[in-house]
Image (spheres, helix red, strand yellow):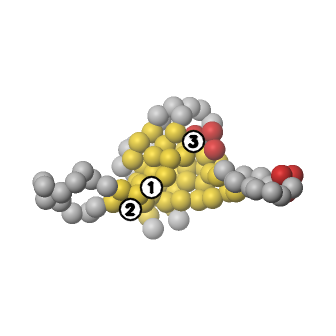
Amino acid sequence: MRGEVASTSAKRRILDTGSIVYVRYYDHVLFRDVNPELYKPFIREAIGWLDYEDDHYIRLVWERYSEPRAEEESKPKATGLIILKEAIMEMRRITRC
């Protein structure tokens, strides 16, 4: 993967909405009835369209409709993820796959 690396340390707009991006981030972990000292955040990665960004989080969409839909159908639907900016380790635009 090649792409432009964007700094995520500052709470500001990183990339243009609609860009295809790679995101590496810390994910929350739920533990139950175990020794809590054995657990820490998972490091995960995702690729998708940057759908929204503000000072606190991004919205990443990885599945959406690609064709126009009939007016009588329900509102547009997508599948994705909200990621807090504080949890982002790396985020870059995908310029070539």
Which amino acid type is shown beneath numbered disc 1?
A: Gly
Q: Secondary structure at mark 3?
A: strand
Question: Left or right: where does residue 42 sit relative to residue 71?
Answer: right
Q: Residue at x 24, y 51 (%)?
A: 75
The tag on residue 63 is: 2
- Can you give x and y, in whole percent of width and height, for residue 22 in the image? 52, 56
- Can you give x and y, in whole percent of width and height, for residue 83 in the image? 54, 46
Mark pair 1, 2: CA separation: 7 Å
Q: Are marks 1 and 2 in contact (CB under 8 Å)?
A: yes
Q: Residue at x 80, y 57 (%)?
A: 33
- Residue that label 3 marks: 84
Which amino acid type is shown beneath numbered disc 3?
A: Leu
- Can you give x and y, in whole percent of width and height, for residue 87 in the image? 63, 44
- Can you give x and y, in whole percent of width and height, for residue 21 in the image? 47, 54
Up-down: is 67 above or below 14?
below
User: Is residue 59 something one can see in this rendering?
Assistant: yes
The tag on residue 80 is: 1
**Upstream in sequence: badge 2 or badge 3:** 2
